[in-house]
Amino acid sequence: MSTSELLLERFRTVDDPAFDEDVVSLGLVADVAVRDGVAAVSLAFNAPLSPAEVEMCDEIRACCRGVGLEPILFAADDRRSPAFSTVKNAVAVGSIDGSVDPSFVGAALLEGFGGIGAAVGALIVEASAGRGTWLESVDPIVLGGEPAAPQRRFDVPAARLDVHLPDGDPPPAVDDVFRALLAYARDGVEWGPLDYLVVVLPPGDSATDATLEELPVDGLVLASRASTPGRAIDREIRARLRRGDPLLGVVETGNGVRRPNCGEVGGRRAPPEALDDVPILASLPVDDWLAGDGEPSAFDPTDRPGERLRALARSVADRLGAKHRASVAELDGDRSVPFEPPDSSAASPR
C-alpha cells in the first residue's frame, strides 16, 4: 500500500458532521500527493471559516501528522459564485412577508462575517432609511462605462443601488431600471476576491424574485418577525422551495425573540415541515448594536452582542458548506442538510 493509499484509509475515520459519512466515501477528498515528507491534500471544501469544514481539516491534518507527514490542504477547485467571478459565495437576505426590512439582518450577517475574519462585501439593493444600520451611510455606486470600485466602509467593499431607482414612475419603467442596475452590479463592479458577498434585498416578493433572477446566489436567508405566525413562515418557505431558491434558513428579529431552533415562532408552534429543512438560524433582538455610523460591534472580538452575530455567520457558512458538499457527493435531493443551533460562546475558527 502506497503512502497516499494509507492516508486515504486514515481519512475514512473523518466523518462529515452534516451527513454522518466519511469524507472519502462522500468524494470530498479530490487528490492526495506525498513528496519529501509533505502530504498535499485537495478537498472539496468551499465555505471559508465554516466550523464544520475547519473541524474536518483539523482531523485530516492530524491523520497526516500521525504518519510523520506535514499536511498542506487546499481547495479542490477555485469555485466562484455563478453571478460574480471573484466571489466564492453570494448570500441574499430577504424577508418572509414584505413587512420586515432585510437591512437589519443583512447588516448583522455582514458584521458577523467580518467578525470571524472572512473577506466580505455588501451589495445593498435597498437600505431603508431610519433603520439605524450602517448600510444607510454607504454612498450610491457611481454608474458609468468603466468598471466601478465599491466604496469601503469599515474595510468592507460596499455598493448601494436603491438611490438610483426613479420615484413615481409606473412599474414597468421601474422594473426595467431595476434589472439594469442589477446587471451593472453583476458585470460592472470590481468586487475583488471575496469569501462572501451579502446581497441585501428589498422587502417584497416581486423585487426579491427579480433580484434572484438577475443575480443567482448560493444561499438565501429570510428575515422574519418573532411575532410572525408559524403558518406564514411555512407558506413562504414552501413558495421559495417551489421556485428552487437556495434557502439556508430564517433569522428572527424583534423584542422577546426566542432561542434558535427551539420549535416555536412568536409563541406559537411552527409547522415542523418548514423548520426541519429550513431552520431558524438565529434570533436577534432589535437594539442599538447596529445603530449609527460607528464601527460595527461584531468586529470587536470581546463584544458579547457581536458574538451573537458571529454565531449567525458561522451558521450560514456551515449551511453553505453542507450544500456545496452535498452537491459534490451527489446526495439524493430529498436528503436535507442537518442543522445544529449555533454555539454563541464558541471561539471564532481560524
Image: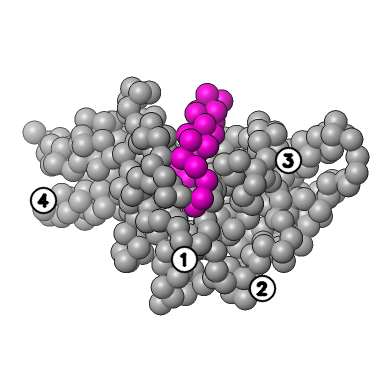
Q: Nearer the viewer, mark 2 or mark 3?
A: 2
Tell me how far mark 4 sits from mark 1, CA to CA: 36 Å
**Mark 2 sits on what residue?**
293
Q: Is residue 256 above or below residue 245?
A: below
Nearer-N-terminus badge (2/1):
1
- Residue 177 visible in image: yes
Q: Amino acid at mark 3?
A: Leu
Q: Secondary structure at mark 3?
A: helix
146 or 84, nearer to the observer:
84
233 or 335, nearer to the observer:
233
Q: Position of residue 58 (x, y in %)?
A: 24, 54
Tell me how far mark 4 sits from mark 3, CA to CA: 52 Å
**In the image, 293: left or right of 315?**
right
The residue lying at 81 percent from left, 53 percent from top is: 163
Nearer-N-terminus badge (4/1):
4
Dots 2 and 4: beta carbons under 8 Å?
no
Label for residue 115?
A: 1
Q: Position of residue 74 (x, y in %)?
A: 36, 47
Q: Which range of residues does the magenta coloring cover?
A: 226-250
Q: Quadrant of residue 239?
A: top right
Q: Nearer the viewer, mark 4 or mark 3?
A: 3
Q: Amino acid at mark 4?
A: Val
Nearer-N-terminus badge (2/3):
3
**In the image, 286: left or right of 136?**
left
Q: Secondary structure at mark 2?
A: loop
Is 233 within the magenta?
yes
Dots 2 and 1: beta carbons under 8 Å?
no
Label for residue 67?
A: 4
